[in-house]
């Protein structure tokens, strides 16, 4: 399967690397307005390939995306220390006006996988610009926040993150909602498991995990300028689900008809992902506070989207 990546910076490059390490993708084409960067990233990643897989990695122009089954969009500006994702909106919407049309001219068959921030609104923008069905324009959404959540819960309770079943919902951003009420360790409630092993899971612990998830990007950006390994792996994970029609449940963002009374908004809930894109949504059972927080998150995204001149 051929995968295109538009935007060969830290996120696009990391996604290419993660895909090459994962294997199962025959060809990766990196496109960037900085052609020298795309060339250099492709060459560097291709030198990792002989150790693990047989993926062909090269740079190219938009025409070279013909035949791609998935095109990852990771072009645009990223946050400076202290900047929010929403502050990138106007600049990255401009970038999408240019690149979504160019991708569409090269391939109409591809599923678009959006990483550029603010990712929920960029997913809405890409859906509108491409004219593709929402199920085929997928934002990485809270896949990364969900990984952060599971990792911190797993570390606290001493179990593997893969055995923690918990999701972050709503915006990939400051208003995101950590769904504690339906989180599970294996098949049992987190609190029950914490009691069984004599661990605390009180408000202080929850607050510390919430901060670890919600503010991870700010901390990483202040320390090293950008985040990219986590999202690179998350994007590769979504590609794998599509490539192998795996029907995995992942928290990703697509245009959604109605969320807690808010119509037509792109945000994350757990969704089934297969070869055709998003196949179904799993609206979680939430407590009253979480539902109210999800509504606030949806309204915030909706208002920011409507503020965008389009
Ligand atoms: N969804 C998520 O969870 C995450 C999203 N991001 C977002 O991903 C985006 C990319 O971040 P980085 O890779 O760190 O930035 P970067 O600056 O390293 O790379 C961006 C690339 O986009 C290219 N670009 C800009 N305008 C273009 C255009 N019109 N046509 C083609 N290429 C163009 C630039 O030349 C640059 O190489 C940002 O918006 C960032 O906020 C970053 C981390 C996590
Ligand atoms: C930058 C970003 O969106 C993240 O790491 O969550």
Image (spheres, helix red, strand yellow):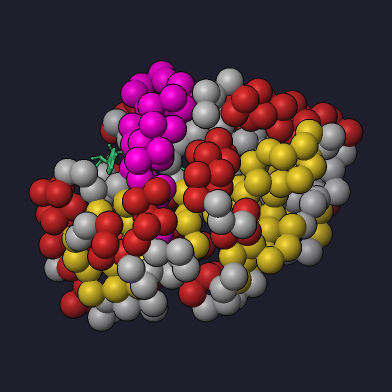
**x and y percentages locating residue 176 in the rendered image:** 64, 34
**Is residue 20 or residue 301 the one in the foreground?**
301
Q: Is residue 157 left or right of residue 57?
A: right
Asked where in the image residue 274 lies, by quadrant, the reply is bottom right
Where is residue 127? Give x, y as percent: 55, 47
Residue located at (72% from left, 27% from top): 299
17 and 210: which is toward the camera:
17
Is 96 colored magenta in this rendering? yes
Segment tinted magenta in the rendering? 71-100
Q: Residue at x 18, y 52 (%)?
A: 38
User: Is 65 above or below relative to 10?
Assistant: below
- At a point 31% along the width and 60% down the height, the residue shown is 16
- Ligand 1 in which quarter: top left
Residue 220 placement, left or right of 308: left
Is 130 in the magenta? Answer: no
Report whether residue 213 is seen: no
What residue is rendered at 68% in x and 38% in y? 265
Figure quadrant of residue 39: bottom left
| Residue 192 visible somewhere in the drawing | yes
Question: Is residue 24 depicted above or below 78 in this figure?
Answer: below
- Which residue is situated farthest in the front direction here? 105
In the rendered image, the residue lying farthest to the right is 288
């Amino acid at each position: 399967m051929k995968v295109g990546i538009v935007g060969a910076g830290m996120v696009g490059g990391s996604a290419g690397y993660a895909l090459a390490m994962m294997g199962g993708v025959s060809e990766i084409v990196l496109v960037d307005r900085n052609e020298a960067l795309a060339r250099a990233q492709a060459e560097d990643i291709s030198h990792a390939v002989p150790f693990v897989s047989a993926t062909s990695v090269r740079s190219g122009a938009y025409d070279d995306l013909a035949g791609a089954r998935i095109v990852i969009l990771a072009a645009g500006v990223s946050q400076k220390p202290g900047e929010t994702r929403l502050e990138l909106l106007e600049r990255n919407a401009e970038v999408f006006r240019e690149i979504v049309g160019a991708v569409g001219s090269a391939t109409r068959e591809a599923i678009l996988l959006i990483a550029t921030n603010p990712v929920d609104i960029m997913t809405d923008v890409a859906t509108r610009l491409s004219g593709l069905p929402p199920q085929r324009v997928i934002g990485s959404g809270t896949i990364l926040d969900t990984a952060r959540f599971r990792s911190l819960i797993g570390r606290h309770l001493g179990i593997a993150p893969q055995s923690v079943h918990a999701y972050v919902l709503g915006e990939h951003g400051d208003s995101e909602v950590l769904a504690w009420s339906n989180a599970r360790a294996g098949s049992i409630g987190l609190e029950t498991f914490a009691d069984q092993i004599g661990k605390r899971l009180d408000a202080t612990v929850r607050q510390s995990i919430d901060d670890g998830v919600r503010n991870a990007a700010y901390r990483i950006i202040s320390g090293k300028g950008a985040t990219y390994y986590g999202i690179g792996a998350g994007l590769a994970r979504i590609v794998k689900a599509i490539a192998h029609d795996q029907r995995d449940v992942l928290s990703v963002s697509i245009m959604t008809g109605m969320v807690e009374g808010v119509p037509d908004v792109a945000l994350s809930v757990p969704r089934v992902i297969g070869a055709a894109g998003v196949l179904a949504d799993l609206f979680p059972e939430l407590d009253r506070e979480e539902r109210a927080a999800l509504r606030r998150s949806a309204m915030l995204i909706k208002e920011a989207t409507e503020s965008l001149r389009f």
